[in-house]
Image (cartoon, rainbow, N blue to C red):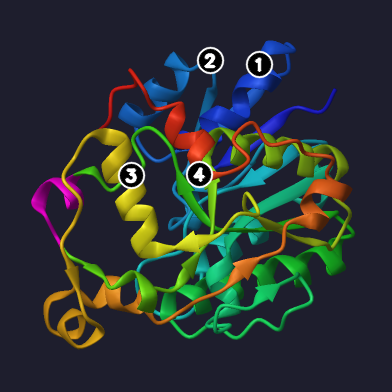
Amino acid sequence: MNPVLIAGCGDIGQRVARPYRAQGIAVQGLARSEARAARLRAEGIEPVLADLADRGMLKDLPTAGAMVFYFAPPPTQGERDPLIQNFLTAIDPARRPAKLVLISTSAVYGDCQGAWITEAQAAEPQTARGRRRLDAENTLRRWGRETGVPCVILRVGGIYGPGRLPVARLQKGLPILEPADSPYTNRIHQDDLARVCVAAAQRGLAGEIYNVADGHPGTMSQYFIDVAKALGLPPPPIVSRAEAEKVMSAGMLSYLRESRRLDNRKMREELAVELQYPDLAAGLAALKNTPQQ
């Protein structure tokens, strides 16, 4: 069976690694430091010391015949992603991977005014973070065409689960937008995302894009309200759109300016994924007795 290499081997990468390790498949993950390498070893993942920002550290990547997962986020500035370019350029043609799966984001679609969208929707990102992700997608698509390596792109909604909830925000009592004015957002539980990644490696078609979400979008404000209720926290205060422009961070306001609902039929049908947490209620119900960070 194909060995596995994970670039950006954080929480999701480690979750993806577990089913492979359970089958006795060798899993390696890139690590920028010895401390990070030690954490990967503790997870049963063999570390490969490499920094995506340092081309000199990307020599002799173990990609031959490997199932490669690229989960590393772009830099936080600019509108390009040089890190994925560094990684792909460093792959020796004699060490051709079996397939490469990229995690991207639904932010590449930009604002769709709350409409349901499929993968056929034009990508028109309105934020720098969305443009960086689209640049990564385009870089991978070009590389895939040039090398013949099958590449699959996952456009992922908001990831949630233990350790990925807005606990600090709710504890601080930060405000949310009036629910009637709140944009639609899309979610996927972290365990389900890991399962989708594995399914994409197994069944994803070369050059294809898949929306990854549970298919039950809700408003951003309702999400905060539901999480607060599930965790036994006070409901967040509500402000108008005008008030939000004065008191919310630029980052939060950028999210409030985009609204879309992801159609996940292609993911369910082509990748044959049955979600463990098919909606937010199921995911939040599983949080009982689970420590939150």
Cβ atoms under marks 1 and 2 closer than 8 Å:
yes
Cβ atoms under marks 1 and 4 closer than 8 Å:
no
Residue 157's place in the image compared with 46, above or below, is below
Distance between the alpha carbons at the discs numbered 2 and 4 = 31 Å
Rendering coords of residue 174 (x, y %): 14, 60
Distance between the alpha carbons at the discs numbered 1 and 3 = 33 Å
Span shown in magenta: 168-174
Quadrant of the rendered structure where residue 244 is? bottom left
Q: Is any atom of residue 154 visible in this view? A: yes
Type of the residue with mark 1:
Arg
Residue picked out by circle 2: 44
* Earlier-in-chain disc, 3 versus 2: 2
Graded by Cα atoms within 10 Å as few (under 14), some (14 to 19) or many (20 or more), the crowding at tag 3 reads many
Image side of residue 246 versus residue 44, left or right: left
Rendering coords of residue 256 (x, y %): 36, 76
Residue picked out by circle 3: 227
Q: Front-most of 114 and 255?
A: 114
| Marking on residue 21 | 1
Cβ atoms under marks 3 and 4 closer than 8 Å:
no
Residue picked out by circle 4: 280
Type of the residue with mark 3:
Val
User: Is residue 272 in the magenta section?
Assistant: no
Type of the residue with mark 4:
Leu
Judged from the image, the secondary structure of the residue bearing numbered disc 4 is: helix
